[in-house]
Image: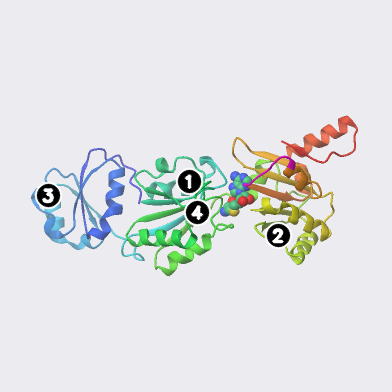
Amino acid sequence: MLIDTDLTDVPVLVVGPSGALPPVVRRYSRAGAVVTTAASSDAVTPQACAGVRLGVLVGPAVTWSAAREVLAATCVVVSETLGAESPSGGRVVLVGAGPGGLELLTLAGVRALAEADVVLTDRLAEVGDVAALAPGAEVIDVGKRPGHHAVPQAEIERIMVERAQAGLVVVRLKGGDPYVFGRGGEEVLAAVEAGLPVTVVPGVTSAVGVPGAAGIPVTHRGVSHVFTVVSGHVPLEPHQAASLATLGGTVVFLMGMHNLVPITTALVRAGLAPDTPAAVVERGFTPDQRSIVGTVDTLADLASRERAASPAVIVVGDVVRQSDVWARRAGAERRAGVSPAMGAVG
Ligand code: SAH
């Protein structure tokens, strides 16, 4: 529960079993309160309550009637019950950060971060200043950075579960949507297996948002009524390429830049027309966003000439014609009266 009231300099006494106190203390401290604690009913003495304006009884302490009586003699008393599913009050929230920038984080994501005691973040979850969004929270970067190894998945899950079992609200902030190639399912399973409450806040996925940022709608009336999102992490098997080539519509590849040659070659071999429009959209929603537009036949060469690199999405299909870069290319070709160019960058 987020505290919306400004409690700057208000003396607050938080009462309850020591394991249940840290997240509550953190929340009141974040609201500006001057927090002291009492971990047993006996510790709630008139001296401990002197000057206190608000007493908070946490979890089992809501039944500590002696403590309540002493507190009520000097200040306002409120009760905070703990979630029924988690005796410690700890829980896990997976938050999709969107494909880049604070503005693409949802309001539910902003709220989850504001309530967090711990944030596990990584390289693709670029929402800016996480510490400002989650004041007072411990921020742990588990992502890959140049020269540093990413924290292994099992270790991420271990940290997440351990902190939540200690009674903390753990936010796992993930790029895009947590369930799109983000190992979100595994992390939810880890929390469930540990008996922890877990919720998932969806995010804008790069599979749809990044083509959109380049003016490419993944579906378009009369052009494409199906879109398929494929991991390009490993090259396509011939039967997969054949399915994609016959299904038609739009195909979006994530994590595919190092396999751009095998991916496009496999699609053409499987029967996709070589002049099918195709694009690479790099670093979507950053000031360096760039589109490289060509055909499934020319895209790999163009991208290599332009030194296109990850993070980027690859889009294959007639919808690519809707992009500004394609329109400029077509306009230039018309004006010059030349045969179609290899492609365009913008
Ligand atoms: N869960 C994420 C995807 C994780 S896989 C989501 O829903 O978006 C990582 C891949 O996402 C990258 O290799 C790249 O293909 C794509 N990606 C993520 N952010 C991107 C961005 N800002 N610009 C271009 N591609 C991006």
308 magenta-colored: yes
Which marked residue is nearer to the observer: mark 4 or mark 1?
4
Front in this rendered view, residue 133 or 302:
302
Read off the magenta span. 305-311
Marks 1 and 3 in Cβ contact (< 8 Å):
no
8 magenta-colored: no
For mark 3, what is the residue? Answer: 48
For mark 1, what is the residue? Answer: 107
Query: Ligand 1: does it lie within 8 Å of the C-beta at label 1?
Result: no
Q: Residue at x 17, y 61 (%)?
A: 64
Residue 150, numbered label: 4
* Amino acid on which disc 3 is placed: Ala
- Marked residue nearer the N-terminal end (1 or 3): 3
- Marked residue nearer the N-terminal end (2 or 4): 4
Front in this rendered view, residue 51 or 289:
289
Which marked residue is nearer to the observer: mark 2 or mark 1?
2
Label 1, label 3: how many angstroms apart (C-alpha)?
39 Å
Image quadrant where residue 253 sits: bottom right
* Amino acid on which disc 4 is placed: Ala
For mark 2, what is the residue? Answer: 235
* Amino acid on which disc 1 is placed: Leu
- Colouring style: rainbow
* Mark 4 nearby-residue class (10 Å; few <14, some 14–19, many ≥20): some
- Label 2 SS: loop
Image quadrant where residue 267 sits: bottom right
Which SS does the magenta portion mostly show?
loop
- Marked residue nearer the N-terminal end (2 or 1): 1
Label 2, label 1: how many angstroms apart (C-alpha)?
37 Å
* Mark 2 nearby-residue class (10 Å; few <14, some 14–19, many ≥20): some
* Mark 3 nearby-residue class (10 Å; few <14, some 14–19, many ≥20): some
